[in-house]
Amino acid sequence: MKMTKFFAWLAIAVGVIYFFVPLLGTFEFSLRMRRGEYSFDAYGSVFSDAAFRATFGFSMLMALLTIIFGMLLIVPTAYWVRLRVPQMRPVMEFITLMPLVIPAIVIVFGYLRLYNSSSYIPFTGSTFGTNVLLVMSYITLSLPYMYRSVDTAMRTIDVRTLTEAAEILGAKWPTILFRCIFPNVMSGVLSGAFITFAIVMGEFTMAALLNRPAFGPYLQLVGANKAYEPSALAVIAFAITWLSMGLLQLVSRFSKMAPSRA
Amino acid sequence: MGAGRPFSSSDRNTGFMSTASSSFIDRRTVVDWLGVAPFMIFALMFLIVPTFYLVVGAFFTPEGTLTFKNIADLFTPTILSAYWISIKVSFASSLGGAIIGFALAWAIVLGGLPSWIRSSLLTFSGVASNFAGVPLAFAFIATLGRTGLVTVFMRDWFGFNLYSTGFNLLSFVGLTLTYMFFQIPLMVLILTPALDGLKKEWREASEILGASTWQYWRMVAMPILWPSLLGTSLLLFANAFGAIATAYALTGSSLNIVPILLYAQIRGDVLHNPNLGYALALGMIVITGASNVLYIWLRMRAERWQK
């Protein structure tokens, strides 16, 4: 028993060293900009950079649009599949897993070939079209997470009874969808939204190859040209990930405490 | 759900009803399928057709005639070595992730540690498994780069120059070490429930029958755990194989791995044959696809014991 405990602590110690040294190293490095003393100069330099604000804002907007349109696509579909075409469930599971199997770089390669400016659907022909394509690519990337969290939330409510009750009371389908189904799967929608946010904010491949001024390519550019700012940016990026995951945990804990009303 | 479904489509399509009032039934069926149409159109446009386009393109020349030359051209030294380095990095990082991740999961489930360690490790794993891409590369440059914290610390305090040992962050070892930062947490997150599923009774029963700890692990726990363990390792492998942002930010284009080669090919046709790029993408899909299929199969085996 003593031995077990010793090895358990040893494993934790190895883990703590492996995970905390890089974080500590990054933070320490980000403070080294002024010679001989620690300062937050690198952060000041990052925040005063206009490109930082522009790309950060752009990625925020993209993340928001991804979440809104992704959820408008996925929640009704998941609802419909549960209610009317349950035989489609394995197909849905399969399709929503595919983005984990096919690397992002392959997907975007396909887009560039299929939707270039001389094709039938020239998404990449205009800035607006490319932005639309970028949001679509982010929805594709986050499909596995969004669909799973929504579907899990839908498992805890009785979709059929809710729908029948609403229909008896005379509700039309937009009412059923937005006033019965959406509020009941809000915990799933939110967990999916937070993880999507974390993914989109740091995403590099899609934005770089579609040539959009997003946060990921900006990070890469700074990394290639500056010394201390990258560490400051890494600390900021880590804080964003931590924040989204913290909110996700909060939501899932909250929804576990609240008893299902169905 | 399940048994009491009043209107599953299979009932509707069979029996005399379908002939008696076929127009009504057909309309319901059509409406049923129309409901999933937006999603299917989305999936076709942004996932299936683009992938399919590349897969088909791999078997054609730029002029449009059928050929296997693109596939054959994958077996040239540059491309072969890119695949080989990619496979090595993915394998090493998934193996390292599996071993350390298993040790951590074991420690928090069976190690008898205080419960706050378990909850904080799981929360941290949720964060760290999503902390990848470009910032992760920055973190490791700041730590193990030429002027990184650990490098400087070892030099100043122990007079030990890490880089004189031939270590280089921008190499196979460095990339493997960096990838493990998101591989280990993923392993912890997936394996912890599997270890939770080991019932206390199995251990007690084997102890009563006189088994040693080693015998218990070898003959009871491991046969139950191995599908989860191997399956998750395969998932980690595919995960590392498709990753590009970390490697690109870390090494630029100095390390010749498949995703970086493909990136360069998309950017500027470095292989001087666009359809060879399709073949390169096809190779990636085949490798990640195979490891994912094996993962799903092993997971189904593993879940038999987690009911």
Image: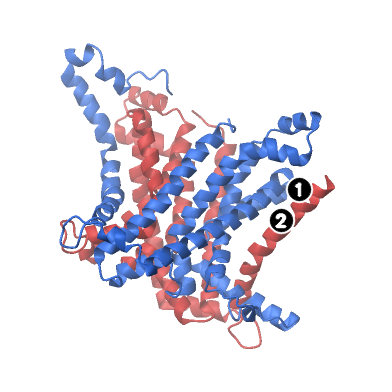
Chain colours: A red, B blue
The front one of B15 and A202 is: B15
Q: What residue type is labelled 2?
A: Ile
- Residue A246 in sight from this viewpoint: no
Determine the chain carrying the residue at label 1. B
Question: Is A123 rendered above or below residue A236?
Answer: above
- Quadrant of the rendering where the N terminus of chain A is positioned: top right
Mark 1–mark 2 contact, CB under 8 Å?
yes
Residue holding disc 2: A12
Quick one: SS at disc 1? loop
The mark found on residue B113 in the picture is 1
Question: Is B198 rendered above or below residue A242?
Answer: above
Question: Is B173 rendered above or below residue B222?
Answer: below
The front one of A21 and A163 is: A21
Q: Residue B96: percent from the left, percent from the top? A: 60, 57
Q: Is residue A140 left or right of residue B295?
A: left
The mark found on residue A144 in the picture is none
Q: Residue at x 50, y 49 (%)?
A: B235
Q: Residue A20: percent from the left, percent from the top? A: 65, 65
- Res A16 → quadrant: bottom right
Q: In this view, does A254 lie to the left or right of A8?
A: left
Q: Residue B143: percent from the left, percent from the top? A: 61, 73
